[in-house]
Image (tube, helix red, strand yellow):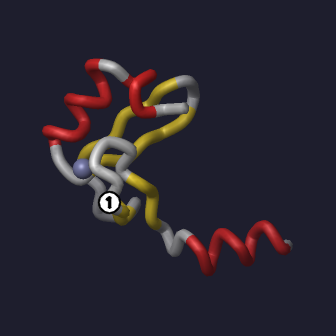
């Protein structure tokens, strides 16, 4: 329950774009990639391509 509340109030349905650092709204995100069973969201095709080229550079 506490985890649920934390999620609700801290992220508000947003995920971080690991390439440029901005928050991406999950509901409207058009660019996403899955890497090691996790889904990553991006603000633009440019960021997604950079991530796809070298995901390990961004995921640590
Ligand atoms: Zn971006």
> Dividing the picture into quarters, in which one does residue 9 lie?
bottom right
Horizontal side, residue 59 vs residue 8: left or right: left
Horizontal side, residue 9 vs residue 57: left or right: right
- Please, is residue 58 above or below residue 28 in the view? above
* Callout 1 crowding tier (Cα within 10 Å): few <14, some 14–19, many ≥20: few
Quadrant location of the N terminus in the rendered image: bottom right
Disc 1 C-beta below 8 A from ligand 1: yes
Horizontal side, residue 39 vs residue 30: left or right: right
Task: Please identify the residue farthest to the left as the structure is shown.
Answer: 46
- Please, is residue 43 above or below residue 1 in the view? above
Task: Please identify the residue farthest to the right as the structure is shown.
Answer: 1
- Please provide percent x and percent y for residue 16: 42, 55
Closer to us: 38 or 55? 55
Q: Residue at x 40, y 60 (%)?
A: 26
- Please provide percent x and percent y for residue 6: 71, 73
Q: Residue at x 49, y 32 (%)?
A: 59
Query: Residue tagged by mark 1?
Result: 22
Q: Residue at x 75, y 70 (%)?
A: 4
- Please provide percent x and percent y for residue 12: 51, 74
Q: Secondary structure at mark 1?
A: loop
How many numbered tags mark residues here? 1
Q: Residue at x 14, y 38 (%)?
A: 46
Quadrant location of the C terminus in the rendered image: top right
- Please, is residue 39 above or below residue 50 in the view? below
- Please provide percent x and percent y for residue 17: 36, 50
């Amino acid at each position: 329950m506490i985890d649920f509340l934390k999620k609700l109030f801290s992220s508000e349905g947003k995920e971080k774009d690991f390439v440029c650092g901005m928050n991406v709204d999950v509901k409207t995100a058009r660019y996403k990639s899955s890497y090691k069973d996790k889904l990553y969201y991006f603000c633009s095709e440019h960021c997604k391509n950079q991530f796809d080229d070298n995901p390990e550079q961004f995921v640590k």
